[in-house]
Amino acid sequence: MNSIKSLKIKVKKEIKRAQSLKELNLIFKKYLGKKGELSLILRSLKTLSLKERKKIGKEVNALKDFLEKEIEKKAQKLYSTLSVEESERIDVTVPGKKPSLGHLHPLTQIKRKVMSIFQGMGFDVIEGPEIENEWYNFDALNIPKDHPARDLWDTLWINQKSKVKNQKLLLRTHTSPVQIRYMEKHNPPLRIIVPGKVFRHEATDPTHEFQFYQVEGLMVDKDVSVSHFKAIIGKFFENFFQRELKFRLRPDFFPFTEPSFDVAISCLICNGKGFILDEQGKSKTCPVCKKSGWLEVAGAGMVHPNVFSACGLNPTEWQGWAFGFGLERLAMIKFKIDDVRLFHCGDLRFLQQF
């Protein structure tokens, strides 16, 4: 106990004599550090009886608290005497820490890239409501209530009716309704693209989501043909993928276009060959295109005359083509991603790659 009291007096004198923060730090390490004198005293208590350990341990801990407060007081006093240059001094030799910056979501990057390419070819970017009514989502697009094509869209209905035409409300299943809204208010010729979110009532898996992004395109004039579409979509693929690609059109069916066709590009993984080489140099079926050599990316066709009539345009005077593709689909091909759900999982390990 006498040693503890004498140690307290000794340390108080040393703290009082300290002339710099550096000296004060040495005092702290000498007595309060992991190998300091107080730590050594506490370790030596194991040789004493329980009664003595409690009594001396209490005194040592009290001394420790006292010295910490005294050193803190002295440190504040010394710091207040420093000049501005000393207190704000920065060691320029210490490597700096680069701040972590955010960046655009990969789908936003793809959307902006698509918009930029089409704007460079004279297309305007148009937006529309995500909550639609039956007229714009189905009827005006040549999909009447009893049409079997309605079964192609797994619709999310809203338990409320529109004030306009007393139509049922729904979450739009495609961006095509914006075409109708635009043609109702604007006279041809026109060129537009419509990027936006759409919704389907379906189960999610690596290639399907209940909400995703589409880009719709529309061109209307007096002498528009499939040849114009082939030239524009070919230029788009070349700019988007930064390489020359083969693409093809095959007959398909969509109620709002006639004739209709699907658009496919040559597989970027196997370069259209249908097979790739494994690690041993042996050929195997391409896992992306399934040996076909082609990737389906869009649906398209010449606008159906009934669609023009629904918008108040004369189908004998105007003609045009329309297309639609998914942004996620383009992103998966460009970035070689095999699961569409990754885009909306919020996993920073995935997002930081882009």
Image: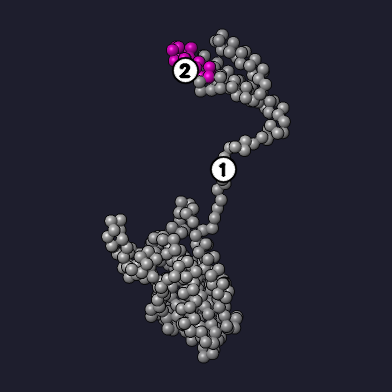
Q: Amino acid at mark 2?
A: Arg
Residue 207 at what x, y percent from top left? Answer: 39, 64
Name the residue that disc number 2 marks: 43
The residue under the point 54% across, 55% down is 103
Farthest bottom residue in view? 316
Lateral position of residue 130 relative to residue 24, left or right = left
Pick the front one: 269 or 15: 269
Residue 60 at what x, y percent from top left? Answer: 54, 17
Q: From which residue to which does the magenta span run?
A: 36-54
Query: Crowding at label 1, few (<14), some or many (≥20) Cα neighbours within 10 Å?
Result: few
Name the residue that disc number 1 marks: 97
Q: Is residue 328 magenta?
A: no
Lateral position of residue 291 relative to residue 171, left or right = left
- Above-or-below relation of 259 to 274: below
Residue 310 at what x, y percent from top left? Answer: 52, 84
Q: Name the main secondary structure of what is drawn in magenta.
A: helix
Q: Is residue 43 magenta?
A: yes
Q: Mark 1: which secondary structure? A: loop
Q: Amino acid at mark 1?
A: Lys
Pick the front one: 55 or 341: 341
Cα–Cα span, label 1 and label 2: 40 Å
* Mark whose residue sits in front, 1 or 2: 1
The residue under the point 39% across, 60% down is 338
